Image (tube, coloured by chain):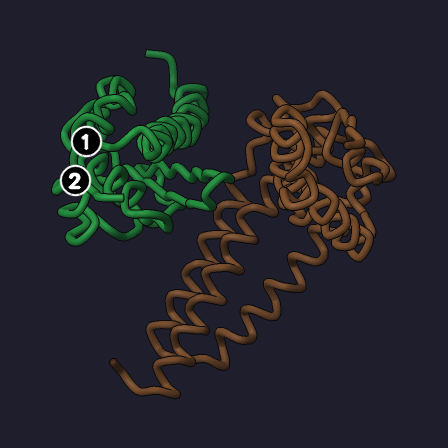
Amino acid sequence: MQTMTHTNYFELFGLAPSYRIDMTLLENTFCRLQGELHPDRHASHSENERRMALQMSADVNDAYRTLRHPVSRAQCLIRLAGYAEAENSATVSPAFLTAQMEWREAIEEASAMQDIKVLEVLARRLRHKLTTQENELAAMLDEQGDFQAAALRMNELRFYEKLRNDIDDVIENMESTTSHGRV
Amino acid sequence: MAYSDKVLDHYENPRNVGSFDQEDQDVGTGMVGAPACGDVMKLQIKVSDDGVIEDAKFKTYGCGSAIASSSLVTEMLKGKTLDQALDIKNTHIAEELALPPVKIHCSVLAEDAIRAAITDYRSKNETETAGYDACKPAA
């Protein structure tokens, strides 16, 4: 078996460490690597080799999950650059938290009123916000190399992702209630 | 994950939910958040002239433990002086609510909120007092 050596997740996938990555290449490499590492292909090998293939396969899964998502990919880059501490020290501002509170209140109000139109408008605005944040994060990591600022932007992105997941859940629940009636 | 009875009680019947006017001089507001779970917590205290917390309110968007931690804290704060309030530690909150290890960060968030609210109140009133003193005629 050919052993794959790597020092980080990007290298494992043959990618340069950057925020903007080729998602199609990531998918394709993932499928190729898992095919190569499949236990069936190593059935005739020594126990040691099979164990190594299994471990490598677990690494590939972890790497894929990490690189696929914006926040964990950014986190990986920030840690690789030696700024792991920045993640904890980058505290979002009270003004940012107040704005988060307002998003939450708007979602709560619209869902209490069962107003799906308002929720959809909020969801669209939120997606727009997420795109802007992601673009800024990409510039900080790939162009400016400002990992301190990137850590703060990443932490803010986490709040927005949580909001997006929650608003999507609310909309989904509302849609299933209206189309199937209350269970 | 199973919540303790105390968490469920605070979650189902949260105490002191609401807001004071953030601009009021006798109100301190603490806004804190946890990026890892996206929780947002607002804790407000209303402080009497002699420095005692006479009322507290909260608004939290987050998991049951975060809501219970902030609800409990509003009860603990009432009647305490600001210095006594600063003695409330996350371990007290976690113990009282029997929080499991994975939810300890919710009690940490509540402790941070207390500190933020007190800091806000103090910074609001320090400047005020200083300005007042400066204008006070010599005795």
From the image, tell me which residue sits under label 2: B4
Q: Secondary structure at mark 2?
A: loop
Q: Secondary structure at mark 1?
A: loop
Q: Residues within 10 Å of mark 1 (few under 14, many from 20)?
A: some
Above or below for B124 versus B38: above
Above or below for B95 versus B62: above
Report the amino acid beneath label 1.
Ala
Task: State the residue at coordinates (38%, 65%).
Answer: A108
Q: Colour of chain A?
A: brown
> Who comes first in sequence, dot 1 or dot 2?
2
From the image, tell me which residue sits under label 1: B98
Q: How far is the residue under mark 1 from the one under mark 2? A: 6 Å
Can I make out residue A71 in this image? Answer: no
Q: Position of residue A114 (x, y in %)?
A: 37, 79
Above or below for A55 versus B87: below
- Which chain identifier belongs to the green chain? B
Name the disc covering residue A55, or none: none
Q: Position of residue A1 (x, y in %)?
A: 77, 32
- State which quadrant residue B69 falls in: top left
Report the amino acid beneath label 2.
Ser
In depth, the one of A56 and B51 nearer the eye is A56
Total tally of numbered discs in the picture? 2
Q: Quadrant of the N terminus of chain B?
A: top left
B86 displayed left or right of A89: left
A173 displayed left or right of A14: left
